[in-house]
Image (cartoon, rainbow, N blue to C red):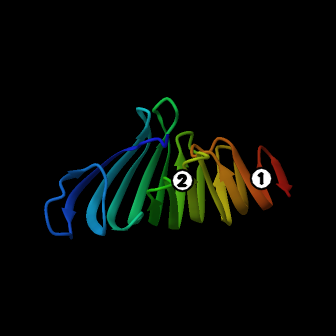
Amino acid sequence: MKPRYLWLFLILSCSKEGDLGVNTGFYGDQSGTDIVAIQSENGRKLWLLRADSMFQAGDTIRLKKVELEFFNKYGKSQSVLHADSGVYFQESGNMVGMGHVEVLGNDGSFMRTKTLTYSKTDSLIYTEDSVYIKSKDQEVWGIGLRSDPGLRRIEVVKQVRGHGSDQRWEK
């Protein structure tokens, strides 16, 4: 049985005729501004999305000026992603942030890249673009990244260089 997700979209103004008010999903081509969406699974909040505007065509929702807050398995906020734009795929639950993508972890860690994909199935964020990561005592540059949304388990794929704790390294 395929899991069902609770969707709550609050649209404060819409460009489609009619009052959409509060919806539990979008059907057909729609657009709106001041978007807020929450996704949960089995009563656990996975993420909270805010966007300046959206346009939906079928399964794909395009977003502008995105803020995406990720929650851990205990319902605590673990990081916040900011991006110029994004795409959400309803069927898979995956998202892609594009433009100036930045993720700030609750532990103060910071990551910057051009595009970042969130895989709902794997609960991973990843990119093939260049990345910059800064934590309390390290700075890392490289190409490609795989991480949990909270930036606790980070793997930089190639051309890794950085410094931290009075050490320098390259891979």
Mark in the foreground, 2 or 1? 2
Q: Residue 163 carries which label?
A: 1
- Foreground pick, 142 / 48: 48
Q: Residue 43 carries which label?
A: none
Type of amino acid under label 2: Val
Q: In this view, does 14 lie to the left or right of 80?
A: left
- x then y, percent, for residue 81: 49, 54
Type of amino acid under label 1: His
For the point 69% across and 57% down, the residue is 145
SS for callout 2: strand
- x then y, percent, for residue 18: 13, 64
Tally of marks = 2
Q: In this view, does 56 lie to the left or right of 116?
A: left
Distance (Cα) linking label 2 and label 1: 20 Å
- x then y, percent, for residue 162: 77, 56
Residue tagged 2: 103
Q: Decide: marks 2, 1 in contact (CB < 8 A)?
A: no
SS for callout 1: strand
For the point 45% across and 32% down, the residue is 75
